[in-house]
Image (cartoon, grey):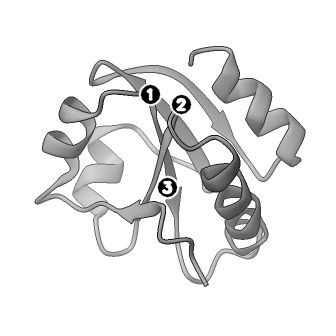
Amino acid sequence: MASELISNLDTTNFDSSIKSASVPVLVDFWATWCGPCKQLGPVLDQLAGEMAGSVQIAKVDVDSNPALAQQLGVTSIPALFLFKNGVVVDKMVGARPKSDIAAFIRKHA
């Protein structure tokens, strides 16, 4: 079960959510059929709680939002995009250990 601290974004709320965020936003591009995406879910849930206030974590289902994934050039999932002030500042592709993702976030937070 996803943490209540993780928001689900789609084409209707993506831009406004990313641009209005007061902290960096880590967006996980994923799909229900993706095994590595499922492995990453609990890690992101933990990080959402541990890093609350310094980063916002959100998810985008690429099957439900193909235009959004295409617009951002998502070619492999899971793909983590870090936005700061509404702009992509870094990306990471593939399931990674929690420590790697935390360091990835801290680099820009």
Query: Is there CB contact under 8 Å for labels 3 and 2?
Result: no
Q: In the rendered image, which residue does mark 3 sit on?
A: 29
Q: Nearer the viewer, mark 1 or mark 2?
A: 2
- Identified at 51% across, 35% down, the residue is 55
Query: Is there CB contact under 8 Å for labels 1 and 2?
Result: yes
Q: Position of residue 100 (x, y in %)?
A: 84, 34
Q: Position of residue 57 (x, y in %)?
A: 49, 49
Element under disc 1 = loop
- Identified at 47% across, 61% down, the residue is 6
Q: In the rendered image, which residue does mark 1 sit on?
A: 24
Query: Is there CB contact under 8 Å for labels 1 and 3?
Result: no
Name the foreground residue: 88 vs 34. Answer: 88
Q: Is residue 7 above or below residue 84?
A: below
Element under disc 3 = strand
Q: Quadrant of the N terminus?
A: bottom right
For the residue marked with disc 2, what is the amino acid? Ser
Q: Position of residue 34 (x, y in %)?
A: 66, 74
Question: Marks 1 and 2, how far apart in space?
Answer: 7 Å
